[in-house]
Image (cartoon, helix red, strand yellow):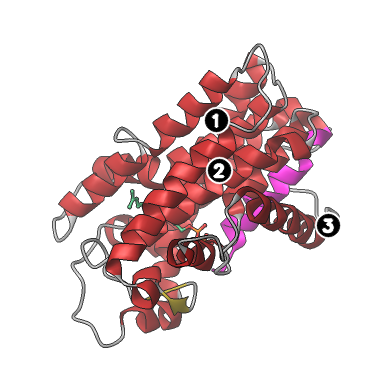
Amino acid sequence: RVAPSSSDPSFPLESYMAERTRWIDRGLRKFLPPPGTRPATIHRAMHYSLFAGGKRIRPILCLAAAEACGGDPAEALPLACAVECIHTYSLVHDDLPAMDNDDFRRGRPTCHKVFGEGIAVLAGDALLTVAFEIAAQSRGWPRYPHRQLILELARAAGSRQLIAGQVADLESEGKSIPLRDLRFIHERKTSALLCCAVRLGGMSANCTPKQLDALTRFGSNVGLAFQVIDDILDITQTSEKLGKTAGKDVKAQKATYPALVGLERSKQIAEQLTQKAFAALEPFGRRGTALRALAEFLLRRDR
Ligand code: GRG
Protein backbone atom coordinates (compact mmCIF):
# COMPACT_ATOMS: atom_id res chain seq x y z
CA ARG A 1 0.00 0.00 0.00
CA VAL A 2 1.16 3.55 -0.73
CA ALA A 3 2.28 5.40 2.40
CA PRO A 4 -0.31 8.07 3.27
CA SER A 5 2.24 10.65 4.33
CA SER A 6 3.88 11.57 1.02
CA SER A 7 3.63 11.13 -2.72
CA ASP A 8 5.47 8.58 -4.87
CA PRO A 9 8.76 10.19 -6.04
CA SER A 10 8.85 7.96 -9.13
CA PHE A 11 5.48 9.27 -10.39
CA PRO A 12 6.12 11.17 -13.67
CA LEU A 13 4.17 14.25 -12.59
CA GLU A 14 5.60 16.64 -15.17
CA SER A 15 4.64 14.53 -18.17
CA TYR A 16 1.32 13.59 -16.51
CA MET A 17 0.41 17.27 -16.10
CA ALA A 18 1.64 18.18 -19.59
CA GLU A 19 -0.48 15.46 -21.17
CA ARG A 20 -3.61 16.36 -19.16
CA THR A 21 -3.08 20.03 -20.03
CA ARG A 22 -3.07 19.10 -23.74
CA TRP A 23 -6.33 17.14 -23.31
CA ILE A 24 -7.93 20.05 -21.45
CA ASP A 25 -6.78 22.65 -24.00
CA ARG A 26 -8.11 20.47 -26.83
CA GLY A 27 -11.39 20.04 -24.95
CA LEU A 28 -11.76 23.78 -24.35
CA ARG A 29 -11.12 24.50 -28.06
CA LYS A 30 -13.73 21.90 -28.98
CA PHE A 31 -16.41 23.11 -26.54
CA LEU A 32 -16.01 26.87 -27.02
CA PRO A 33 -17.15 28.85 -30.05
CA PRO A 34 -13.97 29.50 -32.14
CA PRO A 35 -12.44 32.97 -31.60
CA GLY A 36 -13.58 34.11 -35.07
CA THR A 37 -17.27 33.38 -34.31
CA ARG A 38 -19.41 36.54 -34.63
CA PRO A 39 -19.33 38.75 -32.71
CA ALA A 40 -15.60 38.08 -32.76
CA THR A 41 -14.68 40.47 -29.90
CA ILE A 42 -16.40 38.47 -27.19
CA HIS A 43 -15.07 35.12 -28.42
CA ARG A 44 -11.56 36.52 -28.77
CA ALA A 45 -11.78 37.87 -25.21
CA MET A 46 -12.96 34.49 -23.88
CA HIS A 47 -10.11 32.68 -25.64
CA TYR A 48 -7.61 35.34 -24.56
CA SER A 49 -8.30 34.68 -20.88
CA LEU A 50 -8.79 30.92 -21.16
CA PHE A 51 -5.49 30.41 -22.97
CA ALA A 52 -3.40 32.83 -20.95
CA GLY A 53 -1.10 30.29 -19.35
CA GLY A 54 -3.12 29.18 -16.32
CA LYS A 55 -1.89 26.09 -14.50
CA ARG A 56 -5.11 24.09 -15.20
CA ILE A 57 -4.99 22.77 -11.62
CA ARG A 58 -8.71 22.31 -11.19
CA PRO A 59 -9.38 20.41 -14.43
CA ILE A 60 -6.27 18.25 -13.92
CA LEU A 61 -7.53 17.35 -10.44
CA CYS A 62 -10.94 16.56 -11.93
CA LEU A 63 -9.42 14.09 -14.42
CA ALA A 64 -7.18 12.56 -11.73
CA ALA A 65 -10.17 12.07 -9.41
CA ALA A 66 -11.98 10.19 -12.19
CA GLU A 67 -8.93 7.94 -12.60
CA ALA A 68 -8.71 7.39 -8.83
CA CYS A 69 -12.23 5.96 -9.01
CA GLY A 70 -11.34 3.68 -11.93
CA GLY A 71 -13.05 5.92 -14.49
CA ASP A 72 -12.09 7.06 -17.98
CA PRO A 73 -10.69 10.62 -17.83
CA ALA A 74 -12.22 11.28 -21.26
CA GLU A 75 -15.64 11.08 -19.60
CA ALA A 76 -14.60 13.68 -17.02
CA LEU A 77 -13.30 16.08 -19.67
CA PRO A 78 -16.48 18.17 -20.20
CA LEU A 79 -16.81 18.67 -16.44
CA ALA A 80 -13.12 19.51 -16.12
CA CYS A 81 -13.46 22.12 -18.91
CA ALA A 82 -16.62 23.53 -17.32
CA VAL A 83 -14.79 24.09 -14.02
CA GLU A 84 -11.89 25.82 -15.80
CA CYS A 85 -14.37 28.17 -17.55
CA ILE A 86 -15.88 29.11 -14.17
CA HIS A 87 -12.42 29.62 -12.67
CA THR A 88 -11.40 31.87 -15.60
CA TYR A 89 -14.62 33.89 -15.37
CA SER A 90 -13.92 34.52 -11.68
CA LEU A 91 -10.42 35.77 -12.48
CA VAL A 92 -11.62 38.05 -15.31
CA HIS A 93 -14.23 39.62 -13.02
CA ASP A 94 -11.89 39.74 -10.03
CA ASP A 95 -9.40 41.79 -12.10
CA LEU A 96 -11.98 44.44 -13.06
CA PRO A 97 -11.59 48.01 -11.77
CA ALA A 98 -14.71 47.51 -9.61
CA MET A 99 -13.00 44.61 -7.84
CA ASP A 100 -9.23 44.14 -7.56
CA ASN A 101 -8.34 46.51 -10.41
CA ASP A 102 -5.40 44.52 -11.73
CA ASP A 103 -3.57 45.41 -14.94
CA PHE A 104 -1.74 42.10 -15.25
CA ARG A 105 -2.56 38.45 -14.71
CA ARG A 106 -0.41 35.47 -15.55
CA GLY A 107 2.17 38.03 -16.76
CA ARG A 108 -0.15 39.43 -19.47
CA PRO A 109 -2.45 42.45 -19.52
CA THR A 110 -5.82 41.59 -17.98
CA CYS A 111 -8.89 41.05 -20.15
CA HIS A 112 -10.34 44.52 -19.50
CA LYS A 113 -6.99 46.16 -20.32
CA VAL A 114 -7.03 44.53 -23.76
CA PHE A 115 -10.74 44.47 -24.61
CA GLY A 116 -12.22 47.20 -22.39
CA GLU A 117 -14.36 46.86 -19.29
CA GLY A 118 -17.66 46.18 -21.01
CA ILE A 119 -16.33 43.28 -23.06
CA ALA A 120 -14.46 41.89 -20.02
CA VAL A 121 -17.68 41.85 -17.99
CA LEU A 122 -19.43 40.08 -20.85
CA ALA A 123 -16.53 37.66 -21.43
CA GLY A 124 -16.79 36.64 -17.76
CA ASP A 125 -20.56 36.25 -18.07
CA ALA A 126 -20.16 34.19 -21.24
CA LEU A 127 -17.51 31.93 -19.65
CA LEU A 128 -19.81 31.30 -16.70
CA THR A 129 -22.72 30.50 -19.01
CA VAL A 130 -20.76 28.28 -21.38
CA ALA A 131 -19.57 26.25 -18.38
CA PHE A 132 -23.12 24.97 -17.92
CA GLU A 133 -23.53 24.38 -21.66
CA ILE A 134 -20.38 22.22 -21.56
CA ALA A 135 -21.32 20.40 -18.34
CA ALA A 136 -24.68 19.50 -19.87
CA GLN A 137 -22.76 17.58 -22.57
CA SER A 138 -21.11 15.26 -20.06
CA ARG A 139 -22.32 11.72 -19.48
CA GLY A 140 -24.74 11.26 -16.62
CA TRP A 141 -25.22 8.08 -14.57
CA PRO A 142 -28.32 6.86 -12.71
CA ARG A 143 -26.47 7.71 -9.46
CA TYR A 144 -25.26 11.05 -10.82
CA PRO A 145 -27.78 12.33 -13.39
CA HIS A 146 -27.13 15.61 -15.22
CA ARG A 147 -29.36 17.40 -12.72
CA GLN A 148 -26.91 16.55 -9.95
CA LEU A 149 -23.80 17.48 -11.96
CA ILE A 150 -25.26 20.88 -12.83
CA LEU A 151 -26.40 21.41 -9.23
CA GLU A 152 -22.89 20.65 -8.00
CA LEU A 153 -21.37 23.22 -10.35
CA ALA A 154 -24.02 25.88 -9.66
CA ARG A 155 -23.66 25.52 -5.89
CA ALA A 156 -19.87 25.85 -5.98
CA ALA A 157 -20.07 28.97 -8.18
CA GLY A 158 -23.01 30.57 -6.40
CA SER A 159 -23.68 33.07 -3.64
CA ARG A 160 -23.10 30.57 -0.84
CA GLN A 161 -19.66 29.52 -2.09
CA LEU A 162 -17.41 31.24 -4.68
CA ILE A 163 -19.34 34.51 -4.71
CA ALA A 164 -19.83 34.38 -0.92
CA GLY A 165 -16.05 34.16 -0.55
CA GLN A 166 -15.54 37.11 -2.86
CA VAL A 167 -18.15 39.20 -1.02
CA ALA A 168 -16.65 38.40 2.39
CA ASP A 169 -13.21 39.17 0.97
CA LEU A 170 -14.37 42.55 -0.37
CA GLU A 171 -16.06 43.39 2.91
CA SER A 172 -13.00 42.46 4.97
CA GLU A 173 -10.64 44.75 3.04
CA GLY A 174 -8.66 47.03 5.32
CA LYS A 175 -10.15 45.39 8.44
CA SER A 176 -8.48 43.08 10.89
CA ILE A 177 -10.44 39.82 10.92
CA PRO A 178 -10.06 36.69 13.06
CA LEU A 179 -8.62 33.47 11.61
CA ARG A 180 -12.10 31.92 11.66
CA ASP A 181 -13.35 34.58 9.22
CA LEU A 182 -10.31 34.19 6.98
CA ARG A 183 -10.99 30.47 6.82
CA PHE A 184 -14.62 31.22 5.89
CA ILE A 185 -13.31 33.29 2.94
CA HIS A 186 -10.75 30.70 1.83
CA GLU A 187 -13.21 27.81 2.03
CA ARG A 188 -15.56 29.63 -0.30
CA LYS A 189 -13.33 31.71 -2.56
CA THR A 190 -10.86 28.94 -3.32
CA SER A 191 -11.63 25.56 -1.80
CA ALA A 192 -15.24 25.24 -2.98
CA LEU A 193 -14.48 25.20 -6.74
CA LEU A 194 -11.39 23.05 -6.33
CA CYS A 195 -13.37 20.56 -4.24
CA CYS A 196 -16.18 20.67 -6.81
CA ALA A 197 -13.67 19.78 -9.57
CA VAL A 198 -12.53 16.72 -7.64
CA ARG A 199 -16.09 15.63 -6.78
CA LEU A 200 -17.23 16.03 -10.38
CA GLY A 201 -14.31 13.85 -11.50
CA GLY A 202 -15.48 11.15 -9.11
CA MET A 203 -19.09 11.50 -10.24
CA SER A 204 -18.08 11.19 -13.90
CA ALA A 205 -16.64 7.78 -12.94
CA ASN A 206 -19.84 6.75 -11.16
CA CYS A 207 -17.98 6.66 -7.84
CA THR A 208 -19.45 5.14 -4.71
CA PRO A 209 -20.83 7.45 -1.97
CA LYS A 210 -17.81 6.48 0.19
CA GLN A 211 -15.41 7.46 -2.58
CA LEU A 212 -17.26 10.76 -2.98
CA ASP A 213 -16.88 11.46 0.75
CA ALA A 214 -13.15 10.72 0.53
CA LEU A 215 -12.79 12.98 -2.52
CA THR A 216 -14.65 15.75 -0.69
CA ARG A 217 -12.24 15.53 2.25
CA PHE A 218 -9.30 15.48 -0.15
CA GLY A 219 -10.60 18.40 -2.24
CA SER A 220 -11.48 20.67 0.66
CA ASN A 221 -8.13 20.17 2.39
CA VAL A 222 -6.13 20.61 -0.81
CA GLY A 223 -8.24 23.68 -1.63
CA LEU A 224 -7.47 25.30 1.71
CA ALA A 225 -3.78 24.39 1.48
CA PHE A 226 -3.74 25.89 -2.03
CA GLN A 227 -4.98 29.25 -0.74
CA VAL A 228 -2.61 29.28 2.26
CA ILE A 229 0.25 28.68 -0.20
CA ASP A 230 -1.16 31.42 -2.46
CA ASP A 231 -1.06 33.80 0.53
CA ILE A 232 2.53 32.75 1.26
CA LEU A 233 3.59 33.21 -2.39
CA ASP A 234 1.96 36.63 -2.35
CA ILE A 235 4.57 37.84 0.09
CA THR A 236 7.56 35.65 -0.84
CA GLN A 237 7.31 36.10 -4.63
CA THR A 238 6.94 39.83 -4.76
CA SER A 239 8.46 40.58 -8.18
CA GLU A 240 5.57 39.35 -10.32
CA LYS A 241 3.00 40.73 -7.89
CA LEU A 242 4.74 44.10 -7.83
CA GLY A 243 4.57 44.07 -11.63
CA LYS A 244 0.82 43.56 -11.32
CA THR A 245 0.29 46.71 -9.30
CA ALA A 246 3.09 48.87 -10.69
CA GLY A 247 2.06 52.47 -11.17
CA LYS A 248 -1.05 52.14 -9.04
CA ASP A 249 -1.94 53.30 -5.57
CA VAL A 250 -1.21 50.81 -2.82
CA LYS A 251 -4.22 48.53 -2.53
CA ALA A 252 -6.35 47.99 0.51
CA GLN A 253 -4.68 45.44 2.76
CA LYS A 254 -6.21 41.97 2.58
CA ALA A 255 -6.21 39.49 5.42
CA THR A 256 -3.90 36.54 4.75
CA TYR A 257 -2.57 33.58 6.73
CA PRO A 258 0.98 35.01 6.98
CA ALA A 259 -0.46 38.35 8.19
CA LEU A 260 -2.53 36.62 10.87
CA VAL A 261 -0.28 33.76 12.04
CA GLY A 262 3.14 34.46 10.50
CA LEU A 263 5.02 32.79 7.65
CA GLU A 264 6.32 29.74 9.51
CA ARG A 265 2.97 28.86 11.08
CA SER A 266 1.30 29.33 7.66
CA LYS A 267 3.72 26.83 6.11
CA GLN A 268 2.95 24.36 8.91
CA ILE A 269 -0.78 24.81 8.35
CA ALA A 270 -0.40 24.15 4.61
CA GLU A 271 1.64 21.00 5.41
CA GLN A 272 -0.99 19.79 7.89
CA LEU A 273 -3.83 20.36 5.43
CA THR A 274 -1.91 18.43 2.78
CA GLN A 275 -1.35 15.55 5.23
CA LYS A 276 -5.12 15.46 5.82
CA ALA A 277 -5.62 15.37 2.06
CA PHE A 278 -3.18 12.44 1.77
CA ALA A 279 -5.03 10.60 4.55
CA ALA A 280 -8.32 11.03 2.68
CA LEU A 281 -6.78 9.18 -0.29
CA GLU A 282 -5.98 6.01 1.64
CA PRO A 283 -9.04 4.09 0.39
CA PHE A 284 -7.89 4.60 -3.21
CA GLY A 285 -4.57 2.76 -2.74
CA ARG A 286 -2.33 2.98 -5.82
CA ARG A 287 -5.12 4.56 -7.88
CA GLY A 288 -4.71 7.68 -5.76
CA THR A 289 -1.07 8.13 -6.82
CA ALA A 290 -1.71 11.00 -9.25
CA LEU A 291 -3.92 12.89 -6.76
CA ARG A 292 -1.26 12.44 -4.09
CA ALA A 293 1.46 13.73 -6.41
CA LEU A 294 -0.71 16.72 -7.38
CA ALA A 295 -1.38 17.61 -3.72
CA GLU A 296 2.36 17.50 -3.01
CA PHE A 297 3.07 19.61 -6.13
CA LEU A 298 0.54 22.23 -5.00
CA LEU A 299 2.18 22.39 -1.58
CA ARG A 300 5.67 22.86 -3.05
CA ARG A 301 4.72 25.10 -6.00
CA ASP A 302 6.37 28.46 -6.58
CA ARG A 303 3.73 30.12 -8.79
C1 GRG B 1 -15.35 37.51 -9.13
C2 GRG B 1 -17.11 35.78 -8.57
C3 GRG B 1 -15.75 36.25 -8.46
C4 GRG B 1 -14.92 35.52 -7.72
C5 GRG B 1 -13.56 35.84 -7.58
C6 GRG B 1 -11.22 33.44 -7.77
C7 GRG B 1 -11.54 34.74 -7.12
C8 GRG B 1 -12.88 34.94 -6.60
C9 GRG B 1 -10.66 35.75 -7.09
C10 GRG B 1 -9.33 35.69 -7.74
C11 GRG B 1 -8.23 36.07 -6.82
C12 GRG B 1 -7.84 34.95 -5.92
C13 GRG B 1 -6.55 35.08 -5.18
C14 GRG B 1 -8.59 33.91 -5.78
C15 GRG B 1 -8.31 32.76 -4.94
C16 GRG B 1 -8.23 31.58 -5.79
C17 GRG B 1 -6.94 31.58 -6.53
C18 GRG B 1 -5.69 31.40 -5.76
C19 GRG B 1 -6.97 31.73 -7.82
C20 GRG B 1 -5.80 31.59 -8.68
O1 GRG B 1 -5.80 30.26 -9.09
P1 GRG B 1 -4.62 29.61 -9.91
O2 GRG B 1 -3.32 29.87 -9.23
O3 GRG B 1 -4.68 30.46 -11.26
O4 GRG B 1 -4.98 28.20 -10.17
P2 GRG B 1 -4.17 30.09 -12.72
O5 GRG B 1 -3.76 31.42 -13.30
O6 GRG B 1 -3.02 29.13 -12.63
O7 GRG B 1 -5.35 29.50 -13.43
C-alpha separation, residue under disc 3 versus residue under disc 1: 25 Å
- Please report the residue visible at 26 percent of the width from the left and 69 percent of the height from the top: 101
**Which of these two is toward me, 176 or 196?**
196
**x, y (%) of residue 144?**
61, 18
Q: Residue at x 43, y 83 (%)?
A: 239
Q: Is residue 109 above or below residue 302?
A: below
Residue 12 got which mark? 3
Q: Which mark is residue 182?
A: none
- Rate crowding at label 2 as few (under 14), some (14 to 19) or many (20 or more) other CA atoms within 10 Å: many
**Residue type at tag 3:** Pro
Q: Which of these two is toward me, 55 or 182?
A: 55
Is 138 situated left or right of 246 in this image?
Answer: right
Which residue reaches farthest left? 175
First in sequence, mark 2 or 3: give its number. 3
**Mark 3 falls on what kind of element?**
loop
Q: Quadrant of residue 29?
A: bottom right
Secondary structure under the numbered disc 2 in the rendered image: helix
* Residue type of the residue flagged with mark 2: Ala
Asked if ligand 1 lies within 8 A of label 1, the reply is no
In the image shown, does 197 or 130 lie closer to the viewer? 130
Residue designated by label 1: 217
In the image, the segment drawn in magenta is 286-303
- Side of 192 relative to 284 (left or right): left
User: Are the residues at dot 2 and dot 1 in contact (C-beta closer than 8 Å)?
Assistant: no
* Magenta-drawn stretch contains 1: no
Which amino acid type is marked by label 1? Arg
Q: Which residue is mark 2?
A: 82
